Structures are given as structure tokens and as C-alpha cells.
Amino acid sequence: MSTNGSNGAPGNGAASNGHRPGKKIRVAIVGVGNCASSLVQGRYYYENAKPEDTVPGLMHVELGGYHVRDIEFVAAFDIDKNKVGKDLSEAIYTKPNNTYVFQQVPKLDVKVERGMTHDGLGKYLSQIIEKAPGPTADVVGILRERKVDLVVSYLPVGSEEATKWYVEQALRAGVGFVNAIPVFIGREPYWQRRFAEEGLPVIGDDIKSQVGATISHRVLTRLFMDRGVRLDRTYQLNFGGNTDFLNMLERERLESKKISKTNAVTSMLDYEMDPDNVHVGPSDHVPWLEDRKWCYIRMEGTTFGDVPLNAELKLEVWDSPNSAGVITDAIRCLKLGLDRGLKGTLVAPSSYFMKSPPIQIHDDISHNRLEAFIRGEDNETLVGTENLTKAQLKKAASTAPVASATVKKAAAAAR
């Protein structure tokens, strides 16, 4: 593991990956669905926000020297016939997108290019989406020609092969990567090594919402733990009306999603739960809900005297705006990683922004670590050679305001 710039960033502040600190962040989007719509809308909704303003869903209006308006969308890829060829500013409102519209976006002169399909189009989604004709665009060439800094992946759940294909394109083009979906990239040593070898940072995997089902379940689980209530059984049932839930009707596409959401919750406990007593995952698709998601959580526990304690929560959210601010912060943090020449998975940003980071860190600690990262004080990365044990990962989750002695010792042994 590399810590505080010890991964080879030049001393003069120039990035070793060929990127240079600048006033703009040039972003490419893969998957122009509801999440992309909320992200692009938000960039223009807050473009005139003052740095001292408090904006719901953003850590800072100006983060590490980058304002929200410093994000520029310069490339986009999709496979939907109704979106490919359109300007990004038009495609984000095109059906089957059905999220909340809170901002009209000016014409961006960014054409949505024909992307790679692979396993990105599921059985049910293919009934409402027609693939655009023609060959896949030269993704590497476009990323290079438009001087893209980083790619944000919003591919559908279950797009294992498509995700890996786009990661390869990003590596070849020499750009950073934010993996917003539950395909395991940032947490896997193989991909950590690949990004480290190219001198590039990655943040992953599977974006947390601002206040969504998983983060709510996670915080309640930690509350039980901190207050000495034994959690015996729990479930989280989610359903909604967007294409993500339609895609997840294919249960075979859900394996990584269920792993991601379950681990995000159970990692808050200092003991193991019987897998049969935990159920976290999507339940059904209800078209009239559109991009709204309804979540039901039940938790059954035991208190003093073996007396039962049960808690239930219902949460209703607009799904895509709920994560757009988190991605806005993740984009700016990845650009800071590029500016500093960091390589591999960025530990603090991944732990705070993602459901399945390589190290599950308690939320209060990961928040402090992320603020330290923004200030340039916590540049810890994983480069795929650490071989951390389960016990070391568990200790790192709760003992490190900046970087735990356990992790540092393991990193030294790996070098």
C-alpha cells in the first residue's frame, strides 16, 4: 500500500501519469441513463453556487480547489437507438429515462457515441430498448482526442464483461475511472495492480446514495452494535420503477449487487451473522414508481435480559438524484488523485463513496479520512500487492483516523 504520496508522485507536484493539475475536469460518461441525467443536471443547477454555500448532497461546493462548474462533460457512450447520435443535453431526458427533472441543461455539443454492448443489455431491458445500428465507437481514440481525465461508469447492474471492457479502454487511453456499479474493480487486487502499473487512480465500487437504503441500513446496524444490541435477523427489500430494477428482474444479474449491499451492512458488525439471517436486495419492478425507490428494512435484535427489540423503516427516495451529489464529489476527488500522481485504488474516497470499497471503514472514520484526503494529508492507495488478511481489514475499519498502523505494517511487509 502506498501512503501520502509515497507511490512515486514527483516532488514538484506534477502528476506522473501525464495528467496535469488544471481548472477543469474533463469527464466521459458510460451509460446515459437516469443517474447520468441527475449528474449532468446537478452540474448546471449548482454552477453558480458560492463556495461558502451549503449544498444538499455535496461535501463542499469547492472541493480541493475544484468547483462544481469545473466539471465538463466531453464524451458519452450508450447503446440505445433513441440516445445515440443525440446531444448529451437532449439524451438525458430521453425515455426510458424517467427521473426527476430539476434543471434544463444547455446544449453541450457532445454527441452520444455508440458504445459496446457485451452483457450490458439484459433480457427485460431489451424489450424496451432497441440497440443503435452501426459499429462500436473508437472509445480509446475518443478519450485521447478529447483529453478526458476520467470515465464515470453507469452501466446497468450485471454488466460484468462490459465493465471490464470499458476499464481496459480507460487503461489504454490513460484516464482515471469511477466505477459507480456493483462490478468489482476497485476492490480487486488484479485491477488495483493494473491501474497502478499505468500510474492511474480508480475509485470503486458501487456508489452509495446520499441517504439511501444501504447507508440507512448500515447506520442502523452500527447503532445496534454501538449500543450493545445483538442483531439476530435483518432484511432490506427494495423496489422501484426505473430500468435498473427492470434489469434486476434477472436474478442471475444480481450476484455482485447482493454481495455488495450485504457486505456494506454486515461489515458494521464486529461478529459474523449467519447468512440465512440476512437478506439484502432488490424485490421487484413497479413501472408507475418511475425513478422512485421504496425501501423496507426490518431488524430483529436482542437486548439486556435476552429481551427482543425490533425496528422497521420505510424509505422513499428519487433514486438517481440521491447519488448524483456523491458522484460529483467522487469525480473531483479522482481528479485530485490524478493531480497528485496517485496510482491504484484511492482508499479514503472509495471507503466513503462506495458500498464495496477494498476496505470497509466505519462511516464517521471514513468521513474524517476523506476530509484529510481533500486536504492532501491522506493519500493512501492500494496497488494490489498488499495481501491484507481479513483480521487486518477488520482492524483497519475502526482504528484509523488517517492510516492505521495495521495497514501501514502490512504495506511495509508487502514492499
Image (tube, rainbow, N blue to C red):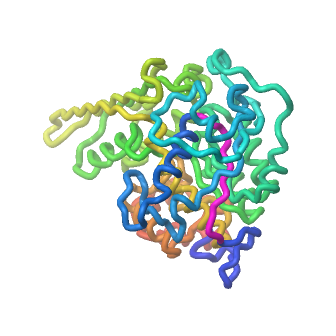
The quarter of the displayed image where residue 344 is located: bottom right
Q: Residue furthest bottom?
A: 12
Residue at figure coordinates x 56%, y 68% from the top left: 380
In what quadrant of the picture does the N terminus appear? bottom right
Left or right for 339, reference 136: left
Chain part drawn in magenta: 22-33
Residue at figure coordinates x 74%, y 44% from the top left: 166
Q: Is residue 149 above or below residue 207?
A: below
**Relative image position of residue 277 (x, y in whole percent):** 38, 30
Q: Residue 24 colored magenta?
A: yes
Residue at figure coordinates x 66%, y 45% from the top left: 29
Left or right for 187, reference 115: left
Residue at figure coordinates x 75%, y 34% from the top left: 85
In the rendered image, is residue 189 in sight? no
Q: Residue furthest front?
A: 106
Q: Nearer the viewer, residue 44 or 7?
A: 44
In the rendered image, is residue 322 in sight? yes
**Relative image position of residue 177 (x, y in whole percent):** 66, 53
**Relative image position of residue 203 (x, y in whole percent):** 59, 55
Left or right for 11, reference 52: right
In what quadrant of the picture does the C terminus appear? bottom right
Q: Residue furthest top?
A: 127
The quarter of the displayed image where residue 160 is located: top right
The quarter of the displayed image where residue 240 is located: top left
Q: Is residue 1 above or below residue 89?
A: below
**Relative image position of residue 60 (x, y in whole percent):** 43, 62
Q: Residue 319 colored magenta?
A: no
Q: Nearer the viewer, residue 323 or 360?
A: 323
Q: How many marks?
A: 0
